[in-house]
Image (cartoon, rainbow, N blue to C red):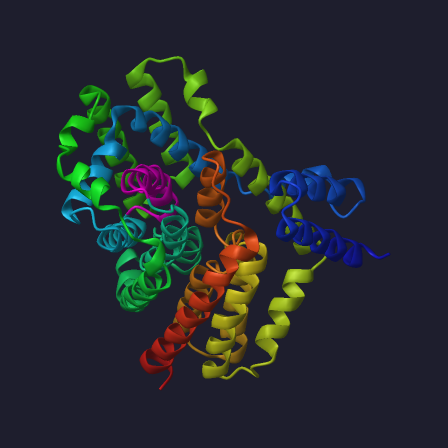
Amino acid sequence: MTTFALAIAIFAVVYVFIIWEKVHRTVVALAGATLMITLGVLHQEQAIEGIDFNTLGLLIGLMVVVGIAKHSGVFQFVAIWATKVAKGNAIMVYALLAVITAVFSAFLDNVTTVLLMVPVIFVIANQLNVHVKPFLVGTILISNIGGAATLIGDPPNIMIGSASGLSFNSFLWNLGPVAVITGFVTIGILLLWYKKDLISHKDAAEEIAKLNPKDAITDWPLLSKSLAVLGIIMIGFFTHSATGLEGATIALAGASLLLLFTLNDPEHHLQEVEWTTIFFFSGLFVLVAGLEEVGAIHILAEKLLEMTGGDLTATTIALLWGSAVFSAAVDNIPFVATMIPLVQDVSEIARIPIEPLWWALALGADFGGNATLIGASANVIVNGMAEKEGQKLGFLSYMKTAVPLTILSLIIATIYMYLRYLV
């Protein structure tokens, strides 16, 4: 068997096992990564180089900060506030949380947002005595859609912005409108989809009405320190282009600062990091590095772009949908990393404007990442946090909701791209 066929076979078997769900996805991913090395597809050094430590560092830093902050009672505060504003109506709470998730994802980034929102969601679901799964699925979908709106909203956008030199305002002006439209359409459909599951009990609503959000705060000094550090981290993300500091550096610096402020033994806080999620990402990065090493992703991407014959409209639409399909299968971060130089080459060779291609790549990767539980960082994190709470989303079960909504979001994006850039 050739190295090319071996890499494809390993990845395919891993993917089947992830969908099968009889073996934990982290074990499967690490086993597949090990096979990539031991069977000669990659050397160990190449495997290590394939791991995106910027992404892992960003996740670990934010998980530490969120893990410390939750001991202040801030998540219970947000949960009680949201339910009181919605007067205990589960449908209204769902819509309110979805809007909050979309806004936070655009201006904080979707990874930070889901880390902040998932603990709140579990508190609310328990208070209202409703199923938590609709909230978790909605959080994944809306966080990726909201994250598409800005330069810092989703890791693929950060990578595209870094390679293209496009500014924060450029992303907001060009992708913000389609993200808003898609977000509202998706929220509306989710409310109809889960209407029967979002029926709050009258007694629960009455009990919530009696609660005071401020009573949920158990440690005001810790809350102040946590909010201050989160503010510093957000400023770091916003000024990334000016300072040159990567997301991992900013997040880990914030985590170190908050650990220093609390002066606690770090062992407890480090135990709250979703290490199974971190190792799953590590294994997935190595698997994709194996596909990249044998040229599989490059070949697929080139064929996708060659089919268009250099026509701007055909190239843009093919890039949008092709990016969505591949991002759903292999995670949008490594796929975008592979596509960036190819997009640059295609624009230069075919002599077509490159900016619409950047927007197509961003929308395809961000929206397409919604289709599966491994399509984007936010998906993996939410699933990992849910499993820790004893709630299993299920790979295929998630796709039954996510795939139709992903296709709809891509149709909206296609219409938007055509009317704005291709007419």
Is 398 one of the magenta-colored residues?
no
Residue 296 seen in this snapshot: yes
- Counting from the top left corner in percent of width and height, residue 293 is at 69, 53
Relative horizontal placement of residue 82, taking residue 142 as reference (left or right): left
Judging depth in this view, the residue of 222 and 149 nearest the camera is 222
Judging depth in this view, the residue of 364 and 237 nearest the camera is 364
Question: In the picture, which quadrant includes the C terminus?
Answer: bottom left
Is 118 one of the magenta-colored residues?
yes
- Counting from the top left corner in percent of width and height, residue 379 is at 46, 49
Q: Residue at x 28, y 38 (%)?
A: 127
Q: Is residue 260 above or below residue 143?
A: above
Residue 246 seen in this snapshot: no
Relative horizontal placement of residue 69, taking residue 422 as reference (left or right): left
Judging depth in this view, the residue of 251 and 352 nearest the camera is 251
- Counting from the top left corner in percent of width and height, residue 177 is at 27, 68
Q: Residue at x 58, y 56 (%)?
A: 330
Q: Residue at x 28, y 68 (%)?
A: 181
Q: Is residue 352 above or below residue 105?
A: below
Q: Magenta residues, as a range?
A: 108-129
